[in-house]
Image (cartoon, rainbow, N blue to C red):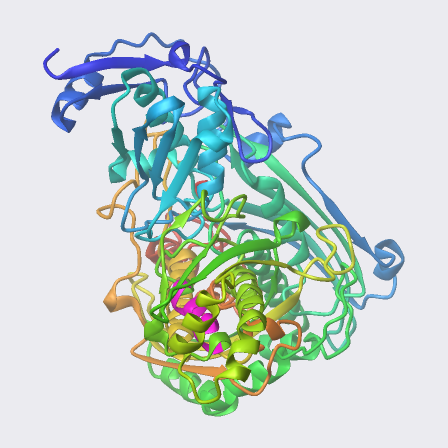
């Protein structure tokens, strides 16, 4: 065919056809069995995209239909799990605690998945060089992963492959491991053709093949005292892992570590199971299992409050962690600011009683429009739960004109990492920010770097750059002493003429952490709280977010403008996850769709938040007087990427409060009802359960989320 250079499949892979983030349970190209729609079989290479797509359509593939598992429920029924990769946490004596409980509630809730929807899709350029050298230019959060997987697939040593990343057009976790598949698929034809190959997915392909946030099913049993103090929790979580393990184990580990949200529970039995399904492998997404677990936690807190007939905010506040409390996994909370954030958010909101009264007055006078107010807290642990990943390197060069080039292992994807690291270098060397430049991230400059993830990159790479700058300051100290009043450039030139090394390699490893299974998996915690008020049209399920007041603990902020942007963006993304964004698959709930096909694979059907969805009144407070004592190398700052995301769930629970008001008008009272996420207009409308919905569904009908 015109312009076509060739077709390449599993028989073309010169090295190994297997890959995977933790275990190699995936194939570069399917050799015999296709385990999901979007599973790569081969690639066609041509001189233009049009020629390549025409050739791809001409490839004939013969399939034999095999039984498929398309939901968590189907996986549970079939016992389709990744055996040996699910973990558990036990604390106290749960069985004995049940006898002390005045109230026990049981239930289950479904938490939907989410598409990353980064603006720049997955893409890579592979450039062959001499002596089997390969350059990988990739849109990835983990250049080192790409480097080693390309080397593995091509059967060459890692030192022959250089992976480079200048910046990303968004990542959110979706390019932590899944970018590898694209790079390796392009590297195979580049190896054979000895020509550069570019492979960029379109939106449809990206959404079908690169995975999403894990959907969860949580089954819980909770017991408390008569006043509402939690005594015991038994919970089992099931996640939709997809057709390979990827990072599902670490995601479930973080979920188990966050199933308490911000609440002290002395007796806990928590288990996690990863379901093997016939969807593209699900993967990391901002929050990494923590938000899913906290969504389950806030659901059981709502259930407890309704069973006791008490205000949900009062029951939540009664159980909030205090300084020095010990979590269910054994970590003592130092510098616990959750109560402070809770109180500051409520203070910013003007107090709950007045806001509740105003909403109740509005609801009393409005039959079909209802308002709801909810307070949602968060506690997010900072560190990779896999201990060895908590390390970072840097390379700092000082030039004779007094300027500084910094290279580190972190990837800039719009979160402001390079700006913060440059600020650390400027402060350490006593220079203006304009004197610092950060080059691209590359594996031949800083090797073996962990992926830019877990909200830890400012801590890790800030620490590594600070270490390099410390070494340089020590070397320059004698020259500064001999040249009082000299400029930095003059000091540097004196050192250069004296043959002083003006380059330094820095390294940082997070101290005193244990990883999952120990009593200190996290370096520290970030805390926050949000008060949201929403107005719901009970006839259509449409809603508007009237106001949100946020308070977030970010320690001594390195850059308040960046941090406020991250808090606002995280909140809106969390709101989208819990209230708007629904992944609809061909499955038992949607039999009109082809099995396993993702229907919502573009902006026309998959609804991410827009300008009309943000609060009409959004107020963000950074808790400035609570420095993090555990990160002195980055000026007592704290992480900010993932911690704010769960505060978006305050909108979900505000909408649920509005539904409670509608159900009360319909004669159903304010008894607890199950509402899965996302709270789409369809789900909200049916949950109102009035005389208009009665002919179509009973009051307790559950409109299920696909996963």
Name the quadrant of the N terminus.
top left
Percent of width and height locating residue 454: 54, 56
Report whether 495 appears left or right of 538. right
Report which quarter residue 625 is drawn in: bottom right
Residue at the image point whose x is 73% and y is 69% from the top: 264
Residue at the image point whose x is 56% and y is 69% from the top: 475
Q: Main secondary structure of the magenta part?
A: helix
Asked if one can make out residue 288 in the rendered structure from this viewpoint, the answer is yes
Asked if one can make out residue 665 in the rendered structure from this viewpoint, the answer is no
Report which quarter residue 632 is drawn in: bottom right
Report which quarter residue 105 is drawn in: bottom right
Question: Which residue, as the protein is rendered here, is positioned at the far left?
Answer: 2
| Count of marks placed on residues | 0
The segment highlighted magenta reads 418-427
| Residue closest to the eye, 426 or 585 | 426
Q: Is residue 421 magenta?
A: yes
- Up the image or down, 376 lies above or below 365; here it is above
Report whether 495 appears left or right of 680. right
Percent of width and height locating residue 550: 46, 79
| Residue closest to the eye, 604 or 46 | 46
Q: Is residue 276 magenta?
A: no
Residue at the image point whose x is 37% and y is 10% from the top: 63
Percent of width and height locating residue 179: 40, 38
Percent of width and height locating residue 381: 62, 63
């Amino acid at each position: 065919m015109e312009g076509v250079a060739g077709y390449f499949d599993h028989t073309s892979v010169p090295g190994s056809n297997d890959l995977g983030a933790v275990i190699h349970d995936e194939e570069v190209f399917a050799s015999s069995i296709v385990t999901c729609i979007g599973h790569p079989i081969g690639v066609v290479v041509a001189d233009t995209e049009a020629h390549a797509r025409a050739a791809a359509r001409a490839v004939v593939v013969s399939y034999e239909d095999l039984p498929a598992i398309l939901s968590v429920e189907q996986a549970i029924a079939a016992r389709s799990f990744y055996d040996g990769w699910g973990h558990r946490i036990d604390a106290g004596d749960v069985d004995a605690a049940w006898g002390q409980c005045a109230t026990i509630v049981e239930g289950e809730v479904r938490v939907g998945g989410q598409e990353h929807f980064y603006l720049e899709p997955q893409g890579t350029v592979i450039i062959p060089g001499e002596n089997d050298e390969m350059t990988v230019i990739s849109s990835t959060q983990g250049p080192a992963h790409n480097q080693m997987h390309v080397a593995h697939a091509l059967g060459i040593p890692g030192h022959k492959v250089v992976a480079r990343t200048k910046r990303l057009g968004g990542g959110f976790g979706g390019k932590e491991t899944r970018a590898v598949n694209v790079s390796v698929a392009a590297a195979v034809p580049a190896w054979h053709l000895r020509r550069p190959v570019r492979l960029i997915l379109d939106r449809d392909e990206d959404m079908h093949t690169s995975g999403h946030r894990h959907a969860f099913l949580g089954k819980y049993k909770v017991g408390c005292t008569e006043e509402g103090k939690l005594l015991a929790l038994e919970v089992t979580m099931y996640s939709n892992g997809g057709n390979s393990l990827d990072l599902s184990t670490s995601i479930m580990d973080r979920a188990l570590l966050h199933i308490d949200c911000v609440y002290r529970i002395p007796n806990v039995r928590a288990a996690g199971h990863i379901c093997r399904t016939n969807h593209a492998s699900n993967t990391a997404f901002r929050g990494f299992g923590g938000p899913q677990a906290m969504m389950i936690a806030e659901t059981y807190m709502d259930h407890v409050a309704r069973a006791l007939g008490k205000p949900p905010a009062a029951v939540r506040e009664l159980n909030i962690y205090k300084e020095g409390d010990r979590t269910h996994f054994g970590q003592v909370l130092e510098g616990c600011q959750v109560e402070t954030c809770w109180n500051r958010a409520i203070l910013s909101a003007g107090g709950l009683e007045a806001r509740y009264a105003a909403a109740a007055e509005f609801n009393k006078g409005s039959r079909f429009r209802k308002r709801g107010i909810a307070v949602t807290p968060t506690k997010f642990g900072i560190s990779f739960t896999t201990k060895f990943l908590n390390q970072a390197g840097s390379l700092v060069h000082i030039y004779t004109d007094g300027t500084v080039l910094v290279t580190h292992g972190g990837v800039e994807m719009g979160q402001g990492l390079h700006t913060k690291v440059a600020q650390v270098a400027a402060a350490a060397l006593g220079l203006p920010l304009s004197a610092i430049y950060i080059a691209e991230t590359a594996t031949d400059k800083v090797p073996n770097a962990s992926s830019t993830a877990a909200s830890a990159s400012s801590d890790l790479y800030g620490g590594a750059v600070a270490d390099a700058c410390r070494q340089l300051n020590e070397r320059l100290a004698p020259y500064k002493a001999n040249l009082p009043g000299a400029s930095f450039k003059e000091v540097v030139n004196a050192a250069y003429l004296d043959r002083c090394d003006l380059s330094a390699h820095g390294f940082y490893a997070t101290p005193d952490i244990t990883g999952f299974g120990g009593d200190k998996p996290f370096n520290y915690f970030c805390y926050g709280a949000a008060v949201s008020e929403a107005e719901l049209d009970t006839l259509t399920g449409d809603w508007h977010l009237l106001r949100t007041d946020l308070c977030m603990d970010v320690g001594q902020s390195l850059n308040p403008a960046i941090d406020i942007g991250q808090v606002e963006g995280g909140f809106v993304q969390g709101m989208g996850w819990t209230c708007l964004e629904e992944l609809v698959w061909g499955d038992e709930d949607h039999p009109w769709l082809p099995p396993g096909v993702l229907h919502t694979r573009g902006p026309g059907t998959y609804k991410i938040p827009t300008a009309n969805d943000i609060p009409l009144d959004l107020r963000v407070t950074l808790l400035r007087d609570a420095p993090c004592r555990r990160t002195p190398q980055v000026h007592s700052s704290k992480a900010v990427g993932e911690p704010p995301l769960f505060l978006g769930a305050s909108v979900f629970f505000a909408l649920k409060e509005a539904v409670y008001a509608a159900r009360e008008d319909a004669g159903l009272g304010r008894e607890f009802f199950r509402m899965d996420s996302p709270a789409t207009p369809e789900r909200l409308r049916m949950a109102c359960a009035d005389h208009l919905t009665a002919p179509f569904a009973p009051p307790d009908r559950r409109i299920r989320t696909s996963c």
